[in-house]
Amino acid sequence: MKKDIHPSNYRKVVFKDMSNEEIFITHSTVAAKETIEIDGETYPLVKLEITSSSHPFFTGKQKLVDTAGRVDKFRSRYGDRKKK
């Protein structure tokens, strides 16, 4: 195996799905501003809007994920299209 090919900041990082609060611990070089403590260990924290644990393609369930009020903004702008 070649030496010195991996980045120096390759470490364990926690990815948190904000729609269902599920966490994943994996190795990454991603920059993180926040930290989280799990089982006495402190890890960098990266918050995600949607992951495989909440995406309809992987879960088989259709659900509305609206974290920034985009659906309400759309409805207020364009109204209800089903009106007669």
Image (tube, grey):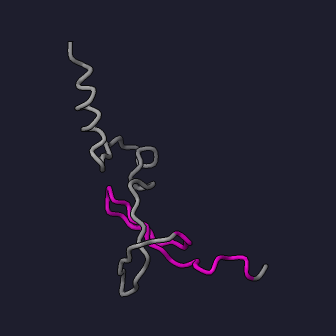
Report the side of 13 relative to 34 (left or right): right
> Residue 44 at x, y = what percent?
43, 76
Report the side of 7 relative to 2 (left or right): left
**Residue lying furthest top:** 84
Q: Name the quadrant containing residue 81.
A: top left
Q: Residue sitting at 35 percent across and 81 percent down?
A: 37
Q: Residue sitting at 29 percent across and 33 percent down?
A: 74
In the foreground, 24 or 5: 5
Report the side of 66 relative to 47 (left or right): left
Query: In the displayed structure, would residue 1 be above or below residue 50?
Result: below
The C terminus appears in which quarter of the rendering?
top left
**Residue lying furthest right:** 2
How many numbered tags mark residues here? Answer: 0
**Residue lying furthest bottom:** 40
**Residue lying furthest front:** 77
Query: In the displayed structure, would residue 6 be above or below residue 60?
Result: below
> Residue 24 at x, y = what percent?
44, 68
Report the side of 72 relative to 14 (left or right): left
Query: In the displayed structure, would residue 69 be above or below residue 4?
Result: above
Q: Residue sitting at 30 percent across and 46 percent down?
A: 66
In the foreground, 39 or 11: 11
In the foreground, 65 or 56: 65
> Residue 33 at x, y = what percent?
41, 72
The N terminus appears in which quarter of the rendering?
bottom right
- Residue 41 belongs to magenta span: no
> Residue 47 at x, y = what percent?
39, 64
Q: Name the quadrant containing residue 27.
A: bottom right
- Residue 22 belongs to magenta span: yes
Q: Which residues are magenta?
A: 4-30
Query: In the displayed structure, would residue 49 be above or below residue 70?
Result: below
